[in-house]
Structure formats: structure tokens, C-alpha cells
Amino acid sequence: MKEATGELNMTLVTIIAIAAVLAFVTFFLPQILNTVGDKWNDAEATECHQEGGKTVCYRGDEKIG
């Protein structure tokens, strides 16, 4: 009986750990993807400068950031 209880406890710990990781990824993934996309667009820009404390980049006449 002790062995079955130990296995149940490990199963619950595993399920809680997986849920915690999924919650973390669900919460932070959109921001991470936006940041990567912004950096990618900035890298493709031909001209960047500061406007009001923010970096603004242009590709030709198109404002991209």
C-alpha cells in the first residue's frame, strides 16, 4: 500500500509540474514571440533613430518599429 501511495504522490507532483510549465509558457510565449519579431524587423531596417525616447526604424518610407 505504501508503494501505491508513493506512486500516486509522484504522479500528482508530475502533473502539477507539467501544469506549471504550461502556464508559464502560455503566459510568456506571446511576449517572447513579439519581442523576437520586433528584433527581426529592426534587423531588416535600413534606418533607425530615436523619437521621443523610443527607437523607430524605417525600411524605405515604411515605418516598421
Image: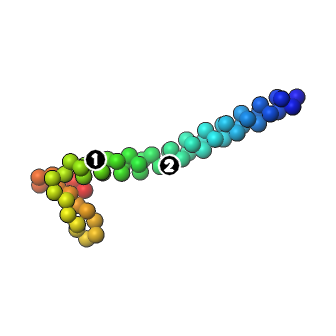
**Residue 62 visible (yes or no):** no
Viewer-closest of 6 and 12: 6
Residue at 83%, 29% in the rendered image: 3
Amino acid type for the residue under numbered disc 1: Trp
Image location (x, y in percent) of residue 63: 18, 56
As helix, strand or loop, the secondary structure at mark 1 comes to helix
Image location (x, y in percent) of residue 17: 64, 41
Amino acid type for the residue under numbered disc 2: Phe
Image location (x, y in percent) of residue 35: 36, 51
Q: Badge 2, how many Cα within 10 Å: few under 14, some, many 20+?
A: few
Residue at 28%, 69% in the rendered image: 53
Residue that label 1 marks: 40
**Residue 45 visible (yes or no):** yes
C-alpha separation, residue under disc 1 versus residue under disc 2: 22 Å
Residue 27 disc label? 2
In the image, is residue 65 above or below residue 20?
Answer: below
Tell me if 60 is positioned left or right of 7 in this view: left
Residue at 66%, 41% in the rendered image: 16
